[in-house]
Amino acid sequence: MRWRTVATLSDVWDGICSQPGRVLISFITIVVGIASLTGLFAVLNGLQGKTQKLEMELGLNVLGILYQGEPRAKTGVLNERHVKYLSANMDCCLISSIRDYRIPFGDADEVLHVVATDSALINVRHWTMAAGRFLDPLDTKNRARNAVISKGLSRKQSWHIGNKISIGKHLFQIVGIVDLNHDLELESEISDLTLNENVVFVPKTVTPYWLTRSLLAASGNTGENSLMQSRESQVDAIFIKVPAPHVFEDAVSLAQRLLTHPDYYQQEISFLTPASLTRRVKELREVIGLTMGSITILCLVLGGTTLLGLMVLNVKQRVAEIGLRRTLGATERDIIHLFLIEAIMITGSAAVVAISATHLVLALGMSVWPIPIEFSVAGFLFPMAVAITLGLLFSYFPAMSAARIKPSEALRDG
């Protein structure tokens, strides 16, 4: 049995070597088709992964409300009145808010995010504690100078629980370290919700004495006390966590209706949901799937038809050989296997070259191209399976026609 397999493979190899030009053309067309399929699979997987990350970072049942108008008109657009109003009318939901103060930190290009918030934020945003605790209601009530830092900042500055850090000229004690779970994924989608690795959370009731005169001037304000008072009541974003997915749309509609009340209406606020956050990514995924998918199908069909032409010519040129094999005892199944294995060897080797080259090019280009790319085992196995299926499909009928050739006619024609 082993000798017979080796002999069959040897015959297949001799058949491939007998017509290198035609085999090379078929090989190249299949490489192009499988390469486009591999690239399409990696890009679509990357976009799907980004969609899932964005949904998880905002929260599957979380609604974000934020201002999106001119920066200088931001003060007072959303404030604590809106938070209390929504909390009073949406008591089944968990509501939190943030004020994001961005102050110079370390090197000239670095920014420290001092985020004034409450104890509910950790539960709304689905973050996890790496150590210690998050801010609690007593911190807010007592205006405690306690701080929770991000895991990235802790690692970068070697800050730990119990250490005292200076924000402006005031000391805060670290009571917890929070893992933001790669919140930077939100950066390209909505900058107002972006928190880099330099993040410190403080109680929202603490007066922002870290605002310096230079920061006040950059904000277009000349009155230091007036700005501090307005910033203490201002809210940059409100987050509403809905208790169950099936009532999420109802909660969004309720929040929109509440904020159309004349006393609370603001024209330049937007409502951010997981669906709206990922809409652009999904649209991009559909466009790429349609365009690259069409090109991929065209390339695969071209490769398949080229292989079909190769196998038809192969059968015609080897009629005498087929007749001799049949005379020496080869069955129809042996003849079919001979041509099927030849096609699989061509498509399989083309797939290995195409997949390897495509993964290499994509890996080198990941830092250059803005489109996310994700590799997986399925990204290797699926194109390989398509290539083998392509070989079987387009070589089956030529193999069947070769198997039906009668030995006497084959030898006479030969």
Image (cartoon, rainbow, N blue to C red):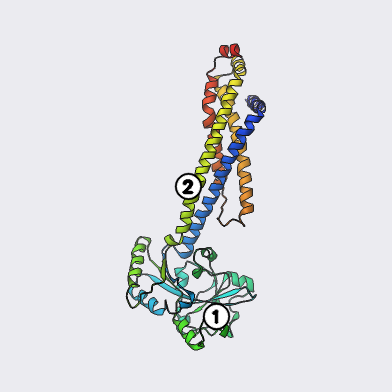
Q: Quadrant of the N terminus?
A: top right
Residue in front for this viewpoint, 84 or 1: 84
Disc 1 element: helix
Q: Position of residue 228 (x, y in %)?
A: 49, 85
Contact, mark 1 vs mark 2 (Cβ under 8 Å):
no
Q: Position of residue 106 (x, y in %)?
A: 64, 76
Instruction: Examine the image and state in which quarter residue 273 appears.
Output: bottom left
Residue in front for this viewpoint, 341 or 243: 341
Q: Residues within 10 Å of mark 2 (few under 14, many from 20)?
A: few
Q: Which amino acid type is marked by label 2? A: Leu
State how many labels appear.
Answer: 2
Disc 2 element: helix
Residue drawn where x is 51% and y is 40% of the image: 297
Q: Quadrant of the C terminus?
A: top right
Which comes sooner in the sequence, label 1 or label 2? 1
Q: Which amino acid type is marked by label 1? A: Ala
Is 392 placed above or below 235 here? Answer: above
Q: CA distance from mark 1 to mark 2?
A: 46 Å
User: In this rendering, would 250 be left or right of 227?
Assistant: left
Residue beneath disc 2: 290
Residue drawn where x is 41% and y is 79% of the image: 80
Residue drawn where x is 57% and y is 50% of the image: 375
Q: Position of residue 319 (x, y in %)?
A: 59, 18
User: In this rendering, would 5 be left or right of 88?
Assistant: right
Residue beneath disc 1: 218
Is 399 placed above or below 273 here? Answer: above
Is 258 placed above or below 291 here? Answer: below
Is 216 placed above or below 373 here? Answer: below
Kindly tell me whether residue 337 is visible in this rendering.
no
